[in-house]
Amino acid sequence: MGMQFYTSPEQIMRDRSEYARKNIARGRNVVVLSCADGVLFVAENVSTALHKLYELYDRIGFAAVGKYNELENLRTAGVRMADLRGYSYDRRDVTAASLAKAYAQTLGSIFTEQTKPFEVEICVAGVGSAPEDDELYRLTFDGSILDEPGYLAMGGQADQLVEVLKVGHDFNAPLADAFALALSALTSGGDNGSRRELTTDVMEVAMLERARPGRVFRRIEGAALEALMPIAGSASSVETDETGAFDEGPEATES
């Protein structure tokens, strides 16, 4: 679509925002929150090959929603930048804040200078020595950077999810409780306020472990993830049981 010469800059920016927003809103949700054990990432992800959650550096994680090849570009750039900075100075000089600022600059210049903005929203999270010291930065497609207070949600129903997180978030909650809250937020996005069913095969879960020295990022999958599920699922299983939601075939997970 060629841009006509009479389109005002304001209109061009508005169109770009609208375009990026609409496409990000189609993305499946990601929830990130601080708890006693570290920073927990829970993403709805139907692909087993393409990840949404990654390690950027020793104590720093990355989560994203949106267009895969674009977020993959951003992730690899972030890893390279972190490595370079750690190598040139000191590993402790690589902080979540410095990476978030660099991402904000990159996204901002892509938004203003290129015809198509990146259709992504990303989170850069750093785990601290105490839950209150964790850093959670959310970056939007235009380079805005938001310093979030212990929890955040990205993707289609982000506002709705944040309401659930706001009510239940506790910095001192253990991992199982934090996961139950994340799951409760992710399943709240059903039609007419109904709860959705989420199974482990459509979830990607990872953690920045507070107590672990050195590199703290680990994926929670397989048996470890299954072990968290029943604890989280017991509250919502009451209403889903009567409707027989558990018997739905694989197409149910594609919604």
Image (tube, rainbow, N blue to C red):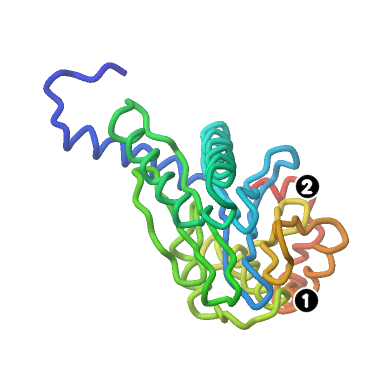
User: Where does the image place residue 60, in percent across and percent down from the top left?
Assistant: 59, 56
Query: Residue at the location (43% across, 44% down)?
Result: 103
Which is more foreground, mark 2 or mark 1? 1
Based on the displayed image, in which of its 4 quarters is residue 251 positioned? top right
Residue 163, compared with residue 124, is above or below; it is below
210 and 33: which one is in front?
210
Query: CB of mark 2 within 8 Å of CB of mark 1?
Result: no
44 and 254: which one is in front?
44
Residue corresponding to mark 1:
231
The residue carrying pointer 1 sits among few (fewer than 14), some (14 to 19) or many (20 or more) residues within 10 Å by Cα, namely few
Based on the displayed image, in which of its 4 quarters is residue 18 positioned? top left
Residue corresponding to mark 2:
250
The residue carrying pointer 2 sits among few (fewer than 14), some (14 to 19) or many (20 or more) residues within 10 Å by Cα, namely few
Q: Is residue 47 left or right of residue 33?
A: right
In the structure shown, which secondary structural element does the residue marked by tag 2 occupy? Answer: helix
Query: Residue at the location (59% across, 77% down)?
Result: 130
Image mark for residue 85? none
Please name the amino acid that badge 1 sits on. Ile
Query: Residue at the location (57% across, 80% down)?
Result: 171
105 and 221: which one is in front?
105
Please name the amino acid that badge 2 sits on. Pro
User: Where does the image place residue 54, in percent across and percent down from the top left?
Assistant: 65, 48
Residue 204, compared with residue 9, is above or below; it is below
Label 2 or label 1, whichever comes before in sequence order: 1
